[in-house]
Amino acid sequence: MPYRLAPPPARLAGRQELLAELRRRLGTKGRAPRVVALHGLGGVGKTSVALAYAHRWKVAHDGLVWQLTAEDAATLSAGFGELAAQLGIHEIVDTTNPITQVHAALAAQDEPWLLILDNVTDYASIRDVLPPAGDGEVLLTTRSAYWPDDIALEVPVLDQRVAAEFLTEHTTGDSSAAADLARELGALPLALDQAASFLDATGHTLGEYLRLLRERRAELLSRGQPLGYAASVMSTWNVAFQRLQTTHPDAITLLRLLACCAPDTIPFRLMLMPPSPVPAPAAPIVGALLGDLFAIADAITELRRYSLVGRPVGGHVSVHRLVQAVTIDQLPSAERDVWRTTAAELVQAVLPTDATVRKSWPRYALLLPHARTLLSPGSQGTIRMVDYLGASGDYVTARLVQSEVYADARRRLGDEHPDTLSALTELARWTGHAGDATRARNMFAEILPVRRRVSGPEHPDTLTVLYQLCDWTGQTGDATRARDIAAELLPIRRRVSGDEHLDTLRIWTELGFWTGQLGDAARARDIYAELLPVRERVSGPEHSDTLSVRDQYARWIGEAGDPLRAKELCAALLPVYERIAGAEHPDTLWARTNLAWWTGEAGDPASARDQYRVLLPVRIRVSGPDHPATLTAWTNLAWWTAQAGDREAALQEYRELLPIRERVSGPEHPDTLRVQSQIAHWTAQPT
């Protein structure tokens, strides 16, 4: 089964009643997921309780046990994409709507499952993420106390007696000193565990630790209580920090670097041993650690001695967010900025140069949460992250991150700065790819007059907006207007950019496509026949844009009267898509759509129907049930079902499709009218 779960808490005390209550609430069988939100003070042990429950009852969840970090929307969305991959839905980087995909997969599971969403911000942020169906359990951890009564479960601090017994069991000292220290620490589980770890590492007694704690309290309280945690927690770590600063300063250097990153799966070895030189400002800050495997290993060893980091696995390590907060908060403000800038430069330095190359995507996936934590929205690293998300097919997350890029540009530069307009152009593009063609078209229509005024009517950026307006106008059903824009734009683009410029080739492609959509298949075929060798020469035979041209060339050959040749070309193209983009990348699914269509047109409607039956649920998982590509596949399934002779099944498909098509495209969209026409036609046919 798909399984991702942090190790069980090594030392958990006084939580038996809480675990029993969790099992009572979650353990009941049913088709609706059971949800519990563990909430309470930071450091009270919410995640520890969740992990203890998951490990105790993991044998009862044969379908799935999976833990996700939930406080950042983009990281959570990408995390659902990885979960979808583990469920066998698609490859990790081939996701467009990962949350919808996982919801569908969990609803279809026959075996019980358990999903943990860790560090949820609030109910509003997680409402649409909660699975709506399935025999499963959802366990949330959160600091927010505002949750519906039927799912809320508060995690209190420990009973004083239990806290004292915990210290007595795990340290050296008498029960009186343990009781005094437990009171001083407020019976906060994290503070107790950290105290035990420190005493175990240093050999101090409970009384000595209590004396050190009291001596440091006033100094630490003068700095405030970061993130709501008691001063005793900061005191514990401050003592360890001072010892490390004296005996192993490289460990403190590493800890400060790790404290700036997202808390989980920090690729410290990659960051400190990058394949190429890092920017000059960062190098002296990390000092001897940079490029020295043994220095890095020694620093990790010392941090583990004080339990300040998790167990390193494969060059990755996790750091509790409280350790991170205290590490950073004890620095002066200017130094915090230096360390965050240093960590950001190290992350950005190891981002692959070309985010569109598939072999670079696993590294981008690894670095995504740290880039989200460290990089400013306007940085080159964030822009490359958007490129990676879009190239890999995760259009929803690409749109989410790009919206932040645009908001940042707008705040810094104003509404009509060229860079702001470029950011808005990208946001409109990813909005369209995420399935909202109408919104994309409207956004480009609003951008165009502003871009013309700011940059000029024939500036390349203005022409890019006009090209996008052409594309998304056509996607909304207005093929005539799209063809006219393309015909107007192509000679301008040729004059401004040259015949073989990529932007010229793109609008050339648009002209061929919308010409064909308006019924002139022979002319479209001829345009693509002229375009294809140019595209292959400029971009290479297996570039994604070249493959798109090959795909459309096959289509218009078929539309012009040679469906068998179209089928042969599509059959040759599909394995190329699968090899380059992945089996369930949106572009690959379009190739499968076209192959199925021309299989039917070439005289085998039953095979076409069967191919669409296999394709449609995949398209729903990858793109969502309302995406235009999904609706196209559904329409084609209904068509070939009818052509294969099953009138009743075809009518059923069309009738289920119609209200969705009306809601998504509108009642007068050509695609909606075609569905209505097919219902009328097959209803009128004699049985």
Image (tube, grey):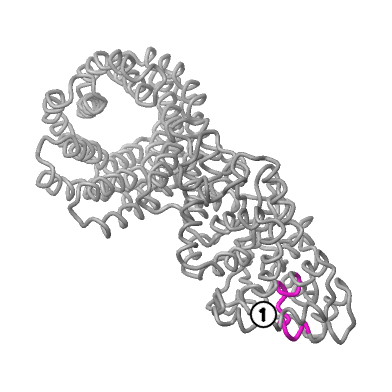
- Quarter of the picture holding the C terminus: top left
Of residue 364 and residue 247, the one placed in the foreground of this image is: 247
Tell me where residue 168 appears, x and y as whole percent. Answer: 87, 77
Q: For the point 71% across and 64% down, which residue is it?
A: 243
Question: What residue do we see at 25% from left, 40% from top?
Answer: 472
How many numbered discs?
1
Q: Read off the residue under disc 1.
A: 216
Residue range of the region highlighted in magenta in the rendering: 181-193
In the displayed structure, would residue 595 be above or below residue 172? Answer: above
- Magenta segment: does it hold 476? no
- 150 above or below 252? below
Write down the quadrant of residue 184 in the picture: bottom right
The secondary structure type at the circle numbered 1 is helix
Q: How many other residues sit within 10 Å of disc 1, few (<14), some (14-19) or many (≥20)?
A: some
Residue 249, image quadrant: bottom right
Pick whichever, 114 or 132, lies toward us.
Answer: 114
- The image shows residue 494, relative to residue 626, as above or below, that is above
Is residue 656 visible from the viewing direction of this image? no
Residue 342 drawn at (x, y percent): 49, 51
Residue found at the very far front of the displayed protein: 246
Instruction: Judge left or right: residue 61 versus residue 587.
Output: right
Residue 182 magenta: yes
Given the image, on which type of amino acid does mark 1 rest?
A: Arg
Instruction: Provide residue 658's location: percent of width, then percent of height.
Output: 35, 47
Q: Which residue is depicted at the point 89% across and 78% down?
A: 173
Relative to residue 610, is residue 40 drawn left or right?
A: right
